[in-house]
Image (tube, rainbow, N blue to C red):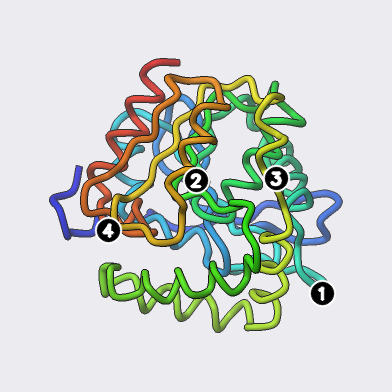
Amino acid sequence: MTRPGEAAAAWAGSRRVEVDGLGARVRYHEAGSGPALVLVHGLGVSSDYWPRNGPPLAAAGLRVLAPDLPGFGRTAHPRGATAVPAQAAALLAWAEAMELGPAVYVGHSLSCQSVLELAAWWPERVRGLVLAAPTGAPRRHPLLRQGWSFLLDIPREDWRLVPPVAQAYLRAGPLRVWRTWRRGTAHDPLPLLPRVRAPSRVVVGERDPVVPRDFAEALARGLPGDGRVAWIRGGPHAVHFSTADAFNREVLELVAGL
């Protein structure tokens, strides 16, 4: 594993696969061999969001894959935004194109809602779930409150996260990011929990202002697992990046128990 504050080696390179039904060639990164683990990026960013997780998790004996969701990174999308259920369907279509069997899915932020949809509606495809800094908490004026909490989070993040996030948001375009975010805040993941069968873990940074504590705990109680939230000391919203070593340990602990 990397030392705190130090990025892991870059991915070996990116690849593309034609995905039926999406009308797009999905770009993805891959490293290692062994049980499959899929890293799913959050709002507006891409598979480049996992430099401190993909290589070290692969070195621990996993086949790690990270796709660009349609419309983000270098995966095209005809037009418009992608709602949460459609993102889950896109993940399923990509996994089928990759001939990927049951895998562990790791979502961050908005993509936690997408991997929950995947696990609820296609449980045979999901061996385990890691929800990192999950969004979807029911609240009044969700866009306003979540937007404010994201602003509070910015100074808590590792400054090295800024360039890749800014580049990804510019590539996706503000309108696509806005529409996807708006649809995400209208999606309630809590009714999905009784349908999920895969062992799950909720991982949140102790300094994350975006994820309400009671929401994280409700997710953990409602999912198969030990019912607890793994609170990462010092972690902000991008818990997988700023506190990568501790986050990677939580992922490996879940995988080891499957």
Q: Residue furthest right?
A: 21
Give the spatial CA distance, label 2 vs label 3: 13 Å
Instruction: Report which residue position mark 1 lands on.
Output: 79
User: Residue under circle 3?
Assistant: 94
Whole-angstrom CA distance, mark 4 to mark 1, is 33 Å
- Tell me where residue 116 appears, x and y as whole percent: 64, 38
Image point 45% across, 31% down: which residue?
201
Quadrant showing the N terminus: top left
Q: Which amino acid does label 2 sit on?
A: Leu
2 and 4 marks in contact (CB < 8 Å): no
Query: Is residue 106 left or right of 96 when viewed as pictured?
Result: left
Q: Which of marks 2 and 4 is nearer the N terminus?
A: 2
Of the numbered discs in the image, which one, if any, rests on residue 39? 2
Residue type pointed to by label 4: Ser
Left or right, residue 234 beside residue 77 = left
Q: Which mark lies nearer to you, 3 or 4?
A: 4
Q: Is residue 124 left or right of residue 167?
A: right
Q: Residues within 10 Å of mark 3 (few under 14, many from 20)?
A: many
Q: How far apart are marks 3 and 4 (CA)?
A: 28 Å
